[in-house]
Image (spheres, rainbow, N blue to C red):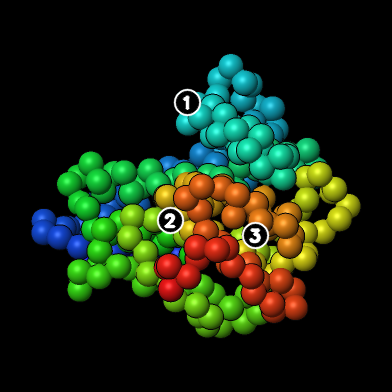
Amino acid sequence: MKSFRTIMGMPVTLDIVGDSINDEVFEKVFSYFRYIDETFSVYKETSEITKINHRIIKPGDYSDDMKKVFDLCEETKRLSNGYFDIKSPGGFLDPSGLVKGWAIFNGAEILKNLGFENFYINVGSDIEARGHNEANEKWKIGIRNPFKKEKEAIKIVKLSDRGIATSGNQLRGQHIYNPLHQNSPANELASITVIGPNIYEADRFATPAFVMGRDGINFIQSLEGFEGYAIDKNGIATMTSGFEKYI
């Protein structure tokens, strides 16, 4: 059973396989995503992150989830050798490069705790795929052509109990910067897709891998349990050694 909403300014799709599925099940996950938007959106004046950036909320008053996300961001910065940093060139904090995948993973855990084992959560093309689809097969997911505004899949991967995230500038314009060289745009790649043990892990490493440019695929190759597919600005694709097992 599938349901769709627009939350966080993005399409959110839930596809759940099983019995006892009703609107209440879907709404528990959608409500969680609305909470994430109200807490972490840098576009909402009322969000906690906006109030933190305007020093309305002081560090001692941060919510538990905000503290958790900040800790995870610091960990990711360390693991990516500084290529992940939530401090924007303007000095504001923007943890969105980690929050979406983290939220999707938590949404998946809500469904798991409700007893569901087979489902798919897609938020703005970042996906957690658990178990199997209605046909009892792995979930089929398309990797989008970064040079086409209309949807066009250049690769189809088959996933079960994995997360997949794509980072790039082509469709949204230059919105990813290099924290180590802020005057140098991150433009060597058109996109990089990362498959990881879950969407949180895949998403948090996709952004720094993109910023690394052509070295990003080597970074993903160095991570145990991860695979990647990079497309450079000239349309040349490079994949990690184990990526083909998902095709």
Marks 2 and 3, the one that precedes in the sequence:
2
Residue lying at the far top of the rendered structure: 60
**Label 2 element class:** strand
219 left or right of 165 in image: right
Amino acid residing under circle 2: Gly
Residue 137 has which mark? Answer: none
24 left or right of 222 in image: left
**Label 3 element class:** helix
- At x 60%, y 54%, the residue is 220
- At x 43%, y 56%, the residue is 163
Marks 1 and 2, the one that precedes in the sequence:
1
Residue 175: image x %, image y %? 72, 58
Mark 2 — residue? 163
Cβ atoms at labels 3 and 1 below 8 Å apart: no
In which quadrant will I find the C terminus?
bottom left
| Crowdedness near tag 2: few (<14), some (14–19) or many (≥20) residues, C-alpha within 10 Å | many
**Label 1 element class:** helix
Cα–Cα span, label 3 and label 1: 34 Å
- At x 42%, y 50%, the residue is 198
Mark 3 — residue? 217
Mark 1 — residue? 64
Amino acid residing under circle 1: Asp
Location of residue 172 by image quarter = bottom right
